[in-house]
Image (cartoon, helix red, strand yellow):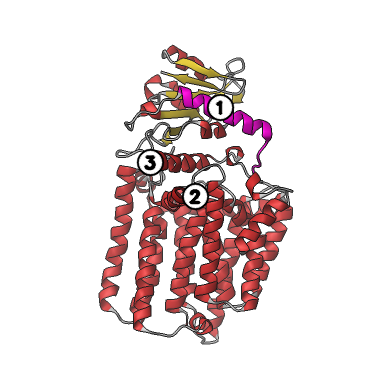
Amino acid sequence: MVPLLSAILFCFRDGKLISDIYIPLGGWSDEITYYKQIEGILAYGMPRGYFGYNQSRALYGSLGVWGLLPLIPYVIFGFFFGWNYCSPVYANILFSMLAFLVIYIFLRPDKKSLGVISIFWITNQFLNRYVLSGVVESSVILQLVVITSCAEYLLSDKVRTLAGRSFTPRKDSAVLVLCTFLICLLTLARPYYGVLFLIPLWKAVKDKNRKLIFSLPFLAVAIIGLFFINNHYFCSVYFNNIFAFDKMRSAGLSGMLLSLFDSIIEILRLIWYALRYKGSGVGWYYLLLGLELFGMTVICILRKIRKQAVPPIYIITLIGNSLILISIIEMYQLGVGARHILALLTVNAVVLILESHFFWGILFAAICLFSIWQTQGADGLPYAEESYSSYMDSLEETFSKIIQISDDISYENVVAMPTADSKAASPDENVSTYYGLLFAVPAGAGVSLDYQDFYDDPDNIKAKYILVHPEGSIRFTLENMGMTCVYEDSTTMLYSR
């Protein structure tokens, strides 16, 4: 119940309830694409319009950048409980509760450790903010918690002793199969988690299982290869292709190392900003991760000096987190990539508390408490406003009559929106339509977010419907193409072919 209590308290500090959260006011574009894809799958089996950026599309199907796998837990939730603006939040709370339950049942922490884990969970505003949102990080955390629990069962004598687990080949085999299967699923969703194959490989080396030692690397390569095949054929492309290996090749090893060095300097700058200035949030993610990895490194060195056994999970975590962080640095901007380390932050803290001392949990909780004061509500929760909710209800009704969803998957069912526009009356000033209005398009419609310069060439435009700001200049490009305004109010205009 700790994650539920955390969610309640997180809302209560604003004088609100969980049911008051209204994700169309969240301002995160990922919430829109995840929500509308799931809605389209539940309504049609597959969205009828393409999801992409700059009106990109998958070669097969209609799904967005990350494909189907990250959506499956939410599709299952929506199938049984329905799908509305509160559904992603309730699903995330459920997945968080399951993650905490796995920690309790599988690892059996003592009361002191369980209490410290609970305090860390409650005080971690970054974790709770993503739980109370429409993005999929909570399901990733659940999978990673189960995998880590399996790893602790397989590799940690201390945890197995504390949990009262006996070493039986049959149990070990079942847990190993479950662990490997979940690693495959997580890697198919996010390829950098392929480094987690170190867990079953370590177990295979420990047991001197030659068959597994030789087969696991091939399985890892096959799964990562399958991810890229799936990504190429069944996923759309982001604004800048995050898997642009040609850029890495052209940069060369020295260029990549220089880029990595620049990113490390930037991370240090973000951490300094978080500590020095109020309202800065991203640096806290990297600060917490850095402290966790520093703590594990110190413990490993001290145990080596004292000729004590080093927990295998620490070595795997240090190697794995480092490689994952490098991958995230190469794939994303540091601000965007920060949420991708949220699952690592959560699991690392639990491992440190269980394997070493509850002191680490108290330290992380204290840092999280300080961050609440320092960030001053940055990335605060979006709560329903009666006037805006009524406006969205009206917009949904209007769009359902205007935007007709056909049975075929095509651009005829796509609603696109430029992320920015220049004012027609004053080109030096920017104006844009709010992302959240895309929540109002009918179930099954695809969504595309486009850069402003994408509209410089009318031949780029393939979507049937375009949402623009009434004061912007892109509307004139659309009118010159022969598109017609089918809806207008003070904040947006909908054009149609």
Instruction: Kindly identify the residue that appears in the image at 38 percent across and 46 percent down.
Output: 67
Residue 306 position (above or below residue 324):
below
The magenta segment is 382-402
Does the magenta run of residues contain 390?
yes
Query: Quarter of the image containing the N terminus?
Result: bottom right
Q: Indicate the position of residue 214 as horizontal and vertical percent values.
A: 26, 72
Instruction: Kindly identify the residue that appears in the image at 61 percent across and 73 percent down.
Output: 114
Count residues near mark 2 (Cα–Cα under 10 Å), then give few for <14, some for 14-19, many for 20+. few
Element carrying mark 2: helix
Q: Indicate the position of residue 478 as horizontal and vertical percent values.
A: 46, 17
State the CA–CA distance, disc 2 to disc 1. 25 Å
> Total marks drawn?
3
Count residues near mark 1 (Cα–Cα under 10 Å), then give few for <14, some for 14-19, many for 20+. some
Q: Indicate the position of residue 362 as horizontal and vertical percent values.
A: 67, 70
First in sequence: mark 3 vs mark 1:
3
Residue on which disc 1 sits: 395
Q: Nearer the viewer, mark 2 or mark 1?
A: 2
Three-letter code, disc 3: Leu
| Residue 63 circle label | 3
| Residue 156 circle label | none
Res 371 seen here:
yes
Label 3–label 1 contact, CB within 8 A: no
